[in-house]
Image (cartoon, rainbow, N blue to C red):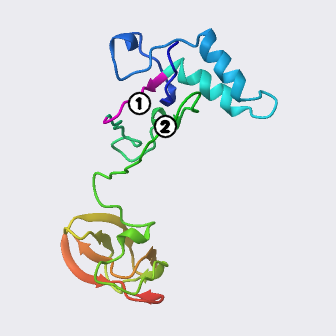
Amino acid sequence: AVHPAPQTVFPHAPRPSIASSLPALESRPLDDEVIGLRDAIVSKDEYTWEPRLIDECYTKLAAAPKKGRAILFYSQHPDGTLDNMATHGGCPVLEGTKWASNLWIWNKAMPFGSSRFQSKDDDSGDSSGVDVEVSTTGVSAEVFWVGGGGEEAPMGTVSQGDNLRLNSFVGHSFVARRNGAEVSRYTVARGAQAW
């Protein structure tokens, strides 16, 4: 008997018709052996998601595991919207053991949302966010987060009388620009701040 491998399944993606000719993809059908293993380890009355997921592992796009193999996919479209086709899950182990590891990679630095972007020069260990209120007394300006490599990510526009509120971390740097020219630069310190 062939032992079903605990695949990674993309349930919104149909299984390609050429799956059997692509060794990285699961091509085994949902056969009696798989159904028997599925029914032996899960109770349809107790768990509703496992049987469905197991079925999808044998009917949808699924990558079969193999030592040394990796799956690379993008979870967002180029415009930053989420790609529903990237929804994925680990298929339940029907027999044996599955070892896996995840590594998330971004194409460019992410400006907010994680203490991992805290400045390496800040040894405080403080990973809590800092509220920064940006204001201008003059003409509107575009505000950009500045990454460690000098790359810039737009954060918004600040206009006279209309403040821009940001939540950041100690050590993050920002630059304000008017018509592309730098007018001000700021690095976040501890505590709520105004710039």
* Residue 164 drawn at (x, y percent): 44, 75
Query: What are the residue bounds of the magenta stretch?
Result: 61-68
62 is within the stretch colored magenta: yes
Mark 1 or mark 2: which comes first in sequence? Answer: 1
Residue depicted at x 24% and y 73% = 178
| Residue for badge 2 | 98
Residue 26's place in the image compared with 89, above or below, is above
Residue 144's place in the image compared with 119, above or below, is above
Residue 65: mark: 1
What is the three-letter code of the residue carrying label 1?
Pro
Residue 65's place in the image compared with 151, above or below, is above
Q: Quadrant of residue 109?
A: bottom left
Q: Quadrant of residue 39?
A: top right
33 is within the stretch colored magenta: no
Mark nearest the camera among 1 and 2 is 2
Residue 7's place in the image compared with 165, above or below, is above
Within 10 angstroms of label 1, few (less than 14), some, or many (20 or more) residues? Answer: some
Element type where label 2 sits in the image: loop
Element type where label 1 sits in the image: loop
Majority secondary structure of magenta residues: loop
Q: Is residue 103 left or right of residue 8?
A: left
Q: Are marks 1 and 2 in contact (CB under 8 Å)?
A: yes
